[in-house]
Image: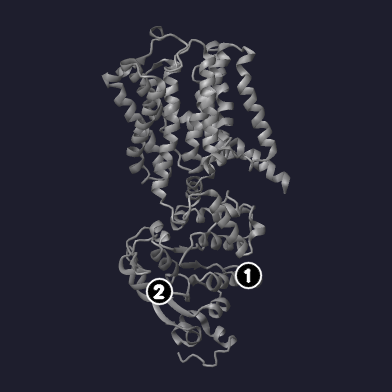
């Protein structure tokens, strides 16, 4: 079943085309990676899908509903949650309170929101941090808290914007375990923007590659790693050499 | 049930806070027994009134981070509704107060809905403007006495009149406003833990994040603005019965708006105790400065200079006010 359909999406800022005629589908239960060089329009794409930016043209269908013109909070209520690349979560709230903000979408009751938040923090192995203020935590932990907060919305689809950027290999492992838990145990469809290739290649079922606002490739990780356009635009030849791409790029 | 439990539950504060709070509360309860001067009594009533104004302001301005400098218009709506209804139709305070509150809340929706399209300084300036416009309207509106204002003459009533809130001795007023003061604390204690309170704190930090967490940012602000307004209007109604003489220049002046915001910011915006601390520091300071420097030494306007200095100090040293300093010191000790 198709959960998200992006049809010919275009987003312009004045004369600048940040997203140009992008189309792709995300199926229920999939894990889709979005990669591309800096400035390729990945975050803009997320902002359009989650309703923060009005799109210039094109359509976005989520769970059978046209959400192109919906506002961000309406999109979130339908079950589409996201995290932010730079997100110092609400600084003077504790970790648990931050997650509660998310949980309050589905309940008015404080005790229910709190119980749900505790459960999420436990699932993501963050319960030790519950009572720290988010501003006191290192970046790695903050990023995991943003994931936990998004889970509070009880989403069908979760958009993760660079949750592993700037983390050390151990932390990347932890985040990866969290994403796998969200995906397979909670059954949430995941779409992630990521620069950490080791991670995105390992866990994605399918990868969409953007460059200069356009979709230049789409496919499973193996074929993406061998795609000459992707190598030229983004991966670079070194990555292919090191990660056993036995084909040398033709161009 | 859960609402009540949350309102009465202060257990997330450190024990020191609760001890101090209990001490202050008991002092407030027995204060009239000490027979201080009537000047001290008047100052205490002012302190309680401004604490309540500050608590109201704190919901939208502190937890929500929307600096509102137009609260005087709602003081006016409350005060005028109660005065007009009492003078013209002999309606008691306990009826006119909720009526005034409804008018104020209605007006706050009319004002708040378009105004919250603005952000930051623009929002603050727009609130000042609407408040001044309403004041000017009241100054030419004959029905409410225009610029002369309204006077409730106590001779017509038989004090102590608990229905109309007409008393001879200030101690009655003191206990009435003290009752509202405690209710106000319970309300804000519930508010800060409620869904709306959490949403507002998230909005204060980052509106885009709040939106993507499913929060209708605009509506949450408008709702909270109405809550803040209800507080202010209630105290405005009380003010009318207590002062018995209201005029636009006095009740709805920009000074009042600024004082309300200043109170909460000095004490600590976005904390439960902040507005009370702020009022506790500023109101005695204001009264005594006026009395000593203004009346005795002839230094009229010195209080305004001092407010200005306080504003500069808060913004330069600690934007979270006195409570911010306390919390910082506390955290440094615990680390």
In the current view of this chain or complex, which residue is farthest to the top?
A: B155
Q: Residue at x 49, y 88 (%)?
A: A226
Residue B63 % position (x, y): 51, 42
Judge left or right: residue B167 versus residue B5: left
Query: Circle 2 marks a residue in which chain?
Result: A
Residue at label 2? A212
Quadrant in which residue B100 is drawn: top left
Q: Secondary structure at mark 1?
A: helix
Mark 2 or mark 1: whose residue is earlier in sequence: 1
Residue neighbourhood size for the residue with mark 1, other residues' Cα within 10 Å, grouped as few (<14), some (14–19), many (≥20): some
Whether residue A89 is visible, yes or no, is no
Judge left or right: residue B333 versus residue A117: right
Q: Secondary structure at mark 2?
A: loop
Q: Residue at x 44, y 53 (%)?
A: B215
Which mark, residue A206?
Answer: none
Judge left or right: residue B68 versus residue A237: left
Residue at label 1? A174
- Residue situated in front as seen by the camera: A73 or A108: A108
Residue B74 % position (x, y): 39, 30
Query: Circle 1 marks a residue in which chain?
Result: A
Residue neighbourhood size for the residue with mark 2, other residues' Cα within 10 Å, grouped as few (<14), some (14–19), many (≥20): some
């Amino acid at each position: 079943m198709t959960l998200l359909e992006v049809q010919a999406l275009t987003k312009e800022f004045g004369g600048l085309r940040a997203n140009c005629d992008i189309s792709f589908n995300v199926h229920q239960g999939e894990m889709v990676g979005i990669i591309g060089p800096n400035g390729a329009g990945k975050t803009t794409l997320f902002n359009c899908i989650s309703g923060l930016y009005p799109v210039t043209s094109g359509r976005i269908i989520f769970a059978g509903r046209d959400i192109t013109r919906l506002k961000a909070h309406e999109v979130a209520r339908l079950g589409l949650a996201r995290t932010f690349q730079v997100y110092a979560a609400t600084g003077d709230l504790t970790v648990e309170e931050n997650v509660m903000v998310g949980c309050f979408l589905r309940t008015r009751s404080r005790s229910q929101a709190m119980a749900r938040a505790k459960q999420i923090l436990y699932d993501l192995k963050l319960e030790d941090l519950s009572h720290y203020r988010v501003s006191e935590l290192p970046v790695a932990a903050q990023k995991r808290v943003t994931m936990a907060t998004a889970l509070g919305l009880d989403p069908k689809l979760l958009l993760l914007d660079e949750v592993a950027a700037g983390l050390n290999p151990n932390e990347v492992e932890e985040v990866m375990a969290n994403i796998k838990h969200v995906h397979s145990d909670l059954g949430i469809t995941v779409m992630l923007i990521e620069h950490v290739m080791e991670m995105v290649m390992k866990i994605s079922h399918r990868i969409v590659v953007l460059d200069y606002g356009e979709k230049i490739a789409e496919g499973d990780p193996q074929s993406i790693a061998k795609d000459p356009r992707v190598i030229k635009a983004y991966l670079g030849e070194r990555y292919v050499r090191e990660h056993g791409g036995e084909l040398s790029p033709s161009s | 049930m859960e609402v009540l439990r949350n309102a009465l539950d202060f257990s997330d504060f450190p024990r020191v806070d609760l001890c101090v709070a209990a001490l202050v509360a008991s002092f407030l309860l027995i204060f009239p027994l000490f027979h201080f001067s009537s000047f001290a009594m008047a100052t205490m009533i002012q302190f309680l009134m401004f604490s309540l104004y500050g608590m109201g302001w704190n919901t939208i301005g502190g937890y929500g981070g929307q600096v509102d400098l137009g609260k005087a218009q709602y003081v006016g709506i409350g005060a005028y509704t109660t005065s007009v209804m009492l003078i013209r139709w002999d309606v008691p305070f306990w009826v006119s107060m909720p009526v005034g509150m409804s008018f104020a809340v209605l007006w706050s929706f009319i004002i708040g809905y378009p105004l919250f399209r603005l952000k930051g300084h623009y929002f603050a300036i727009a609130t000042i403007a609407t408040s001044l416009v309403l004041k000017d309207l009241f100054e030419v509106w004959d029905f409410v006495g225009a610029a002369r204002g309204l006077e409730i003459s106590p001779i017509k009533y038989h004090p102590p009149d608990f229905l109309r809130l007409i008393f001879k001795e200030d101690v009655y007023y003191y206990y009435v406003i003290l009752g509202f003061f405690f209710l106000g604390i319970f309300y804000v204690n519930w508010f800060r833990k409620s869904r709306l309170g959490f949403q507002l704190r998230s909005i204060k930090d980052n509106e885009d994040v709040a939106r993507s967490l499913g929060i209708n940012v605009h509506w949450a602000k408008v709702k909270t603005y109405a809550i803040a307004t209800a507080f202010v209007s209630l105290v405005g109604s009380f003010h009318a019965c207590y002062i018995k003489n209201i005029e636009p220049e006095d009740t709805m002046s920009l000074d009042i708006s600024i004082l309300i915001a200043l109170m909460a910011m000095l004490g600590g915006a976005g904390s439960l105790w902040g507005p009370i601390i702020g009022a506790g520091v500023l109101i005695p300071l204001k009264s005594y400065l006026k009395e000593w420097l203004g009346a005795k030494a002839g230094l009229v306007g010195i209080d305004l200079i001092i407010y200005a200095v306080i504003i500069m100090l808060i913004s330069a040293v600690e934007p979270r006010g006195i409570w911010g300093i306390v919390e910082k010191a506390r955290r440094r000790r615990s680390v």
